[in-house]
Image (cartoon, rainbow, N blue to C red):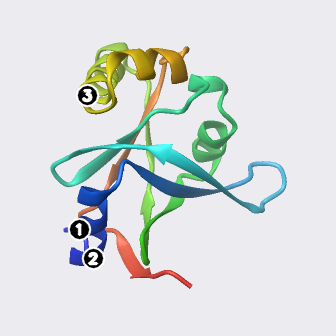
Amino acid sequence: MVHADFEKTLEETTQIVITTTGRTTGREISNPVWFVRQGDKLYLLPVGGSDSQWYKNVRKTPTIRLAAGETAYTARAIPITDPARVNKVVANFRDRYGARDVKAYYPKPDVAVEVPTDDADIHQRD
């Protein structure tokens, strides 16, 4: 279950920050992203689809950090490549952010990412 502070922040925001590990540099790289929450999972869409750098980083090192407000958590990102599942995530993004914005910002919705929050390592941000 997501920590209460993080959960409250998720309810009050439309954007979180993810930090991935660079697949060639090994450095931490942070990006703001939109998300959709479904139960104990967050779903993310890479802006450039499978060509997005952060998505490629997740494929190599699936442990990511998500931050919102004063809390953050570390969890394992699971790439989604099945077209039917990706389409469901895209539909949920349309419901939350509007079809026009999703079409404008996500021109290649060929992949998505699932982040379970039920066993996340939650901590205060530094």
Label 2 with label 1: CB-CB less than 8 Å: yes
Q: Earlier in the sequence, mark 1 or mark 3?
A: 1
Residue 74 lies left or right of residue 93; in this view the side is right
Q: Which residue is mark 2?
A: 5
Q: Is residue 79 above or below residue 101?
A: below
Q: Nearer the viewer, residue 29 or 10?
A: 10
Mark 3 residue element: helix
Question: Residue at 82% across / 49% down in the picture?
Answer: 24
Amino acid type of the residue that numbered disc 3 sits on in the rendered structure: Asn
Amino acid type of the residue that numbered disc 2 sits on in the rendered structure: Asp
Amino acid type of the residue that numbered disc 1 sits on in the rendered structure: Lys
Mark 1 residue element: helix
Question: Residue at 66% across / 25% down in the picture?
Answer: 51
Q: Which residue is mark 3?
A: 92
Q: Which residue is mark 1?
A: 8
Question: Residue at 56% across / 29% down in the picture?
Answer: 47
Residue 4 location (% of width, % of height): 21, 76
